[in-house]
Image (cartoon, rainbow, N blue to C red):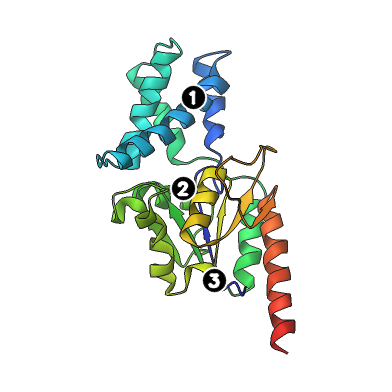
């Protein structure tokens, strides 16, 4: 299958959601990593509950509410200042170290690139700028446009609508297996960046390709383009 565009998940794929753990550890010694993990799990759970119940609120609000709950669950005294600092840190999460170079290499290949994310437009704009990724993406797509979170079909539809391409010709890249599988169900060609060596979800299907880093995506795309060129000649 010829690949003609690439869409990336943002949180966990381009930006390290657990990088907030360092700041959390300063405030709650011995609990930083646990808070970061609980925060992320709760955040994703809340997006699913709200989409299933048709109770959309912006991802920034979901993230803040998930932080408040997670702190309570872990018995942590989260002050207003703690909340402000942690949310500010979440707005400009660290990018994974290989990502900027890999994105620049993909851009040189001539394929249009997009972000397709649960994040609000404002959150994504700040994250992209703070990571030095300005100018690399042809589209920055937020589910705010449809007010449903992934894995709702309406969220995944944003990609082919923006690129004006058949879904199968778009490579959807995510480090979240559930997201890659949701995109597979929708019809994307998918690449799961399995950074942590996690087992495949038991959902009756699997991403088309699996790797460990964004540089693996670069290798896959180069091979795909070379194979397409050979077939056309």
Of marks 3 and 1, which one's residue comes earlier in the chain?
1
Q: Determine if residue 202 is in view.
A: yes
Residue carrying label 1: 38
Whole-percent x, y for residue 131 in the image = 53, 49
For the residue pair 26 and 102, the one nearer the viewer reads as: 102
Q: State the CA–CA distance, disc 3 to disc 1.
A: 35 Å
In the picture, which quadrant includes the C terminus? bottom right
Q: Which mark is residue 169?
A: 3
For the residue pair 15 and 38, the one nearer the viewer reads as: 38
SS at badge 1:
helix
Mark 2–mark 1 CB contact (< 8 Å): no
Kindly identify the residue that appears in the image at 42 percent across and 59 percent down: 140
Residue 176, compared with residue 36, is above or below; it is below
Q: Left or right: 109 with respect to 77?
A: right
Residue 13, compared with residue 31, is above or below; it is below
From the image, state whether disc 2 or disc 3 is nearer to you. 3
SS at badge 2:
helix
Q: Residues within 10 Å of mark 2 (few under 14, many from 20)?
A: many
């Amino acid at each position: 299958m010829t690949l003609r565009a690439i869409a990336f998940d943002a949180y966990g794929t381009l930006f390290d959601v657990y990088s907030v753990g360092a700041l959390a550890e300063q405030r709650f010694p011995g609990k930083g990593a646990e808070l970061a993990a609980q925060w992320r799990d709760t955040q994703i759970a809340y997006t699913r509950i709200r989409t299933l119940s048709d109770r959309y609120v912006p991802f920034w609000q979901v993230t803040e509410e998930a932080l408040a709950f997670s702190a309570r669950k872990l018995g942590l005294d989260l002050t207003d200042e703690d909340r402000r600092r942690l949310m500010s840190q979440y707005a400009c999460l660290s990018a994974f170290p290989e990502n900027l170079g890999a994105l620049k290499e993909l851009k040189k290949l001539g394929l249009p690139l997009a972000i397709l994310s649960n994040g609000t437009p404002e959150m994504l704009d700040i994250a992209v700028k703070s990571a030095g990724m300005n100018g690399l993406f042809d589209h920055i797509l937020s589910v705010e446009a449809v007010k449903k979170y992934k894995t709702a079909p309406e969220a995944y539809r944003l990609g082919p609508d923006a690129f004006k391409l058949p879904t199968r010709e778009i490579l959807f890249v995510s480090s979240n297996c559930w997201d890659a599988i949701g995109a597979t169900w929708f019809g994307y060609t998918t690449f799961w960046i399995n950074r942590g060596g996690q087992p495949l979800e038991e959902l009756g299907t699997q991403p088309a390709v699996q790797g460990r880093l964004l540089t693996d995506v670069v290798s896959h795309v180069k091979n795909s383009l070379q194979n397409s060129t050979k077939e056309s000649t």
